[in-house]
Amino acid sequence: MDSRGTKRGAEKTEVAEPRNKLPRPAPSLPTDPALYSGPFPFYRRPSELGCFSLDAQRQYHGDARALRYYSPPPTNGPGPNFDLRDGYPDRYQPRDEEVQERLDHLLCWLLEHRGRLEGGPGWLAEAIVTWRGHLTKLLTTPYERQEGWQLAASRFQGTLYLSEVETPNARAQRLARPPLLRELMYMGYKFEQYMCADKPGSSPDPSGEVNTNVAFCSVLRSRLGSHPLLFSGEVDCTDPQAPSTQPPTCYVELKTSKEMHSPGQWRSFYRHKLLKWWAQSFLPGVPNVVAGFRNPDGFVSSLKTFPTMKMFEYVRNDRDGWNPSVCMNFCAAFLSFAQSTVVQDDPRLVHLFSWEPGGPVTVSVHRDAPYAFLPIWYVEAMTQDLPSPPKTPSPK
């Protein structure tokens, strides 16, 4: 392209987007699984860049102090017999879900490490930064029939940031959460307490408080298709006996599920629950999910290990099953859609991607509150730290 063309292009953008006018929303993105059934896309083996911890008051620490160690009961013993109701609700400190944390903890980590990122500082300008949980929702979208989602996206210094927004429906459900569901959530955390120790080689202590503010998070780098990814997710524990002590291959994901008694119940479990477990563990490269199966009284009587890479085998011959290629191809398509939609570099401009089951992903455009999610402290710190002036001077 000659210099004349470049200049004309720059002028055109300026005219098309005056400061007070929001850019036009993009077309929508279909989610029908049949559209994404091609070969499995390239996905770079995730590598851990670092980690951080959140303490009992939900305060950030740039270290591994909250990491716990996998310590299952001996296999030759009488079986687990864990009482998942023990300590509920008197030894339970649940996190305040009204606090919208957005990407803040991950941004703290990024500020601490921005100068030492693998791939150099320029790598971040090409990358997509988000939580693992947000990517998990994208992976499962083609098969999801119940829960919609909203993802806010902003571009800043080239990087595309994605942060989930609680949908009005999800908020209403959370506020009206029945006691039984609250207890089931506790049981999942209680199971972790029975399976994890504070130090390698020591035994779990289930007598303490279950405090869901505490979290250990791994920060990972990967690439899906042409999209470099930097994301973080909570890790339940590390296995000191793992064949490789290199994270993330030493990490273990812990889950609970109700006991299954019929082929129909197992089929439903493989179609729905296993899909979510697979998506959540495949993204960060966690090799195993250990499930505790609980009876109606809340006791875990059996454990089963599901290797992440073998989960698809359970639905391979089920025509109502799920396909990992569809999940990853849809996620890659969404990331391309987001990258080409969010073109303006402005941390206060938000493209809100919304999806409800049965429909396509749609986009609306907003400025500032309530959807802007990149905090002023982050924007200012990153701006002061610009390694060199932008290549194209901004028009006066």
Image (tube, grey):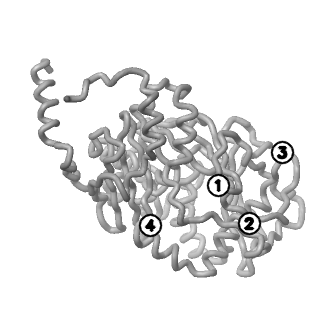
Identify the residue under disc 1: 58
Within the image, what quadrant is residue 89 found in?
bottom right
Which one is closest to the eye, mark 4 or mark 1?
Answer: 1
Identify the residue under disc 4: 320
Residue pictured at 72% horizontal, 36% vertical:
244
Name the residue type under label 2.
Lys
* Other-residue count near label 3 (Cα within 10 Å), few / some / many at <14 / 14–19 / ≥20: some
Mark earlier in primary sequence (1, 2):
1
* Other-residue count near label 4 (Cα within 10 Å), few / some / many at <14 / 14–19 / ≥20: few
Mark earlier in primary sequence (3, 1):
1
Name the residue type under label 4.
Asp
Count of numbered circles in the view: 4
Identify the residue under disc 2: 190
Does residue 271 sit above or below 136 in this rendering? below
Q: Tell me if I can see residue 288 in this picture.
A: no
Identify the element where label 3 is drawn.
loop
* Other-residue count near label 2 (Cα within 10 Å), few / some / many at <14 / 14–19 / ≥20: many
Disc 4/disc 1 C-alpha distance (Å): 41 Å
- Where residue 156 sits in the image (x, y, percent)? 37, 38
Disc 3/disc 1 C-alpha distance (Å): 24 Å
Which corner quadrant holds the N terminus?
A: top left
Mark 2 and mark 4 in contact? Answer it, CB < 8 Å.
Answer: no
Residue pictured at 47% horizontal, 51% vertical:
135
* Other-residue count near label 1 (Cα within 10 Å), few / some / many at <14 / 14–19 / ≥20: some
- Where residue 396 sits in the image (x, y, percent)? 19, 29
Mark earlier in primary sequence (2, 4):
2
Identify the element where label 2 is drawn.
helix
Residue pictured at 52% horizontal, 55% vertical:
101
Identify the element where label 1 is drawn.
loop
Disc 4/disc 3 C-alpha distance (Å): 42 Å
Identify the residue under disc 3: 200
